[in-house]
Structures are given as structure tokens and as C-alpha cells.
Amino acid sequence: MKTFRGFLGFGIAAAFAAATFLPARTIAQDTTTTAASSSKAEQWIHVRVESKEDRGETVRVNVPIEMAAKVIPAINKDNFHDGKVRIDSGHTNEVDLRAILDAVRTSRDGEYVTVQGHDNDVRVAKSAGYLYIHVTDKSEGKKAPGKDGKPGTKAAAGHESKVEIKVPMKVVDALFSAGEDELDIVAALKALSTHGDMELVTVKDDENTVRIWVDSKNIAD
């Protein structure tokens, strides 16, 4: 589960977490104004979350990339300042993210990581200018504990959780273009706006279905 959540968090933060920082009222007002006045096609980030609970809800967020890039630098909270996210050095002391990025960028296309384990399946690859991260969390299908606390004979209710991330390498480059231990969200958004329609993240589990994508429509599917 930790591996699954880690890859999901990285993927969302890498390309599109910016929408999360936008005040709801600002999104609603500026989206309406932009949709009514803009005469040219622009790229929008769409986020759709569908709950599978009894009282299931669907949440949709639609944000023009250009608007997000202008609003985000004005938001300063915790590790988020001037359109950049400060990475806690305590989590990166043993990992040189820029060295890893440079190695991936300059290497030939191929599958860099393939893990098939009891709890998780992981695949990290690069192809045609895109970074792919696929993670399957199988821990939800483990056997349920018996009454005495020992493993039971029947599997616990639940299914595999899957996350698929596709990020243009130019966006990854822009993300790491800031200073040391920082992620440049604004630069990543600007790089993302130069690409056409594309699927960025899909997540499927027993509780929610999440989809994040980019296209020129001002409404979600």
C-alpha cells in the first residue's frame, strides 16, 4: 500500500497537483469567464473522482492550464511558495533526484523497473518521450484474519488497486528545473500546455475511480 500511494502521490504532484491549491470560488468564477470570453482553444486539466460507496458521489474539477499557471504563484502555504513546492530534504538525502532524472532522460527507451511481488506489481518505463509508471497494489486481496487473529482461509473482500501514470518527459524536466530540493509546478504546467489531448492518471480501487486528463474542452466527460 505504501508503494502504491507513493507512486500515486508522485504522479499527481508531478503534473497536475496544482489544481488542488486553487480556491474553489476562484475556479468557478474564472472558469466561467474564460469559457465565455476565450476565442482560442486552450488546454484544460480535468479531474474526476467517482466514489463507489453506498452514497456514491462524483467530483469534477476543470481548470484551464493558463489560469492555473497565473494563480498558483500567488498562493503561499507551508512548503508551497511562488509556484514551487519545497521537498523535505529529510526524504531526499539519500536520493539524487536530478541525477536519476538525467539518467532516465539520456537513456534509451525501455523498461527500467519491473517488479512482480506478493503485495505490488510495479513497472517504470520510458517510450517515445513519455515516462510511464504502472502500479498494482494486491494487498487488498490478502486473506482476512480468523477469529483467533490467525490468517483465515477466505480472502478479504476487495480487489486489486491499480494506478497508471503517463507524463511527458518535457514536463518532468520542467518540474525539476527549479532550485535544489524544489519542484516547479508552474513550469511543469506550461510544459504540459504544449501537448495535445492526453490521459495522465487513472486509478481504480474498491472505493474510488480517479481519472486525470488534459484536453481542450472546458467541461469534463
Image (cartoon, rainbow, N blue to C red):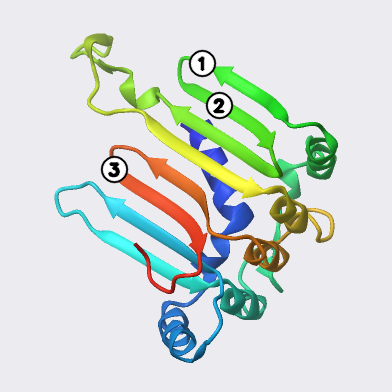
Indicate the secondary structure of the residue bearing disc 2: strand
Q: Is residue 198 left or right of residue 129?
A: left
In the image, what residue occupies the spot 84% across and 60% down? Answer: 179
Marked residue nearer the N-terminal end (1 or 2):
1
Image marks 1 and 2: residues in contact by CB distance under 8 Å: yes
The image position of residue 211, as x and y in percent, is: 41, 52
> Up-down: is 38 above or below 90?
below
The image position of residue 213, as x and y in percent, is: 48, 56
Would you call the spot at circle 2 few (<14 residues within 10 Å), some (14-19), or many (20 or more)? some
> Up-down: is 211 above or below 78?
above
Amino acid tagged 3? Glu
Which of 192 and 136 lies nearest the eye of the viewer? 192
In the image, what residue occupies the spot 30% across and 28% down? Answer: 159
Indicate the secondary structure of the residue bearing disc 3: loop
Q: Nearer the viewer, mark 2 or mark 3?
A: 2
Marked residue nearer the N-terminal end (1 or 3):
1
In the rendered structure, find residue 117 and report the number of the disc placed on it.
Answer: 1
Residue that badge 2 annotates: 122
> Up-down: is 12 above or below 116?
below
Residue that badge 3 annotates: 207
Q: How many numbered circles does the render carry?
A: 3
Distance between mark 1 and mark 3 Cα atoms: 23 Å
Amino acid tagged 2? Val
Would you call the spot at circle 3 few (<14 residues within 10 Å), some (14-19), or many (20 or more)? few
Which of 20 and 102 lies nearest the eye of the viewer? 102
Distance between mark 1 and mark 2 Cα atoms: 8 Å
> Up-down: is 31 above or below 164?
below
The image position of residue 104, as x and y in percent, is: 78, 36
Q: Is residue 195 left or right of residue 51?
A: right
Q: Which quadrant of the structure image shows residue 161?
A: top left
